[in-house]
Image (cartoon, grey):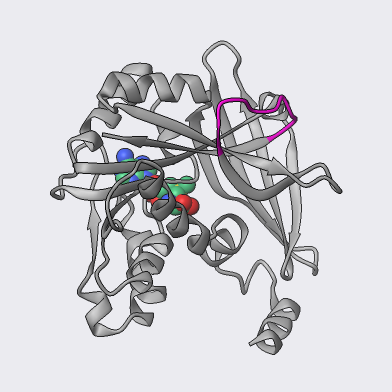
Amino acid sequence: MAKVKRNRTKWRTARTSDPLELYELAVQSPDAEVRMVDRVWKHFGRPGLPHSLREDFAGTCAISAEWIRRRATNSALCIDLDPAVLSWARRHHLSKLTPAQRRRITLRRADVCSANGGPVDAIAALNFSYFIHKSRRALVDYFRHIYGQLGPNGVLLLDAYGGADSFLELTERRSLDGFRYLWETLRYNPISGEVHMAIHFEFPDGTALRRAFTYDWRLWSIPEVTEALAEAGFRRSVTFWEGTDRRTGSGNGHFRPSTRGEACEGWVAYIAAAR
Ligand SMILES: C[S@@+](CC[C@H](N)C(=O)[O-])C[C@H]1O[C@@H](n2cnc3c(N)ncnc32)[C@H](O)[C@@H]1O
């Protein structure tokens, strides 16, 4: 397996790369995310384990595919507006599931703001996708809608990013397996809070996929999000803040329920809420 990866590294160029594959490699950790869903369930004192997951803004459905593999009793409903990305999910993730596993996952092309799917144990809306809601009213309406899609013990998992650098028009770069990932703030408007973001990929041969993905968002703060959740009916919410690696001073990948964060240059946090 490692050998295949090393060979791939040599081959990666803009022409031969699949942007959705690179997206997953750069910004997703489905294993950590499904563990986080279980953790949030326990954090709110829910009995047993959660089984049904709705993944909003599901994109390639990587989290749901992992959820299906995690327990034979798990089911997932993936919701995304883009038929192309859902068909990619079918080819790249559903094709790797067994027929029995495939029967437990449903892909639906729909708007998360109106899609119904029956009561579920957990909803995950990750990689800041709910930032598409630019007004407080739109954000609360979305949270109210998904509140209604949760069972009585239901929990919600979101994430958020921020920090001093998030208000600057900067590019963050990371070298990954045979390519470079760039996360650029193209424009931040301090008056409206709107932010335009882009993901670019660069390759060792000098080629690049510029603006492979772009986002037109509002950069919400954690208290704005938790207040909107409360207004939508969620009785409790909690922020999981990342610990700091003492050696490097950066995040250590361990998230703990916290009421006090750190005024650093950049942070990513999970926000969880319960009915
Ligand atoms: C940033 S990607 C998120 C992918 C994945 N959930 C993740 O964690 O990385 C955003 C996805 O949301 C979808 N999307 C945007 N607006 C939507 C809406 N109103 N309803 C459903 N899907 C939407 C887009 O098609 C895109 O696939």
Name the residue at the right extreme. Answer: 247
Q: Quadrant of residue 158 in the image?
A: top left
Q: Is residue 195 left or right of residue 238?
A: right
265 within the magenta span:
yes
For the magenta stretch, what is the residue range? Answer: 257-266
Q: Quadrant of residue 204?
A: bottom right
Number of disc labels: 0
Image quadrant containing the C terminus: top left
Q: Main secondary structure of the magenta part?
A: loop
Q: Nearer the viewer, residue 143 or 234?
A: 234
Residue 67, image quadrant: bottom left
Instruction: Tell whether 223 sits left or right of 135.
Output: right
Q: Position of residue 179 (x, y in %)?
A: 72, 65
Foreground residue, 84 or 251? 251
264 inside magenta stretch? yes
* Residue sitting at the far top: 191
Residue 101 image offset from top left, x and y in percent: 27, 77
- Indicate the quadrant containing the N terminus: top left, top right, bottom left or bottom right: bottom right
Q: Is residue 205 above or below residue 219?
A: below
Reply above or below: 264 against 159.
above
On the picture, is 221 further left or further right than 103? Answer: right
User: Could you tell me residue 155's position as x and y percent?
Assistant: 31, 42
Tell me residue 209's x, y (percent): 64, 57
**Residue plotted at (71% across, 24% down):** 263
Residue at horizontal 76%, vertical 49%? 173
Residue in the image at 82% along x and 45% along y:
246
Q: Nearer the viewer, residue 237 or 127?
A: 237
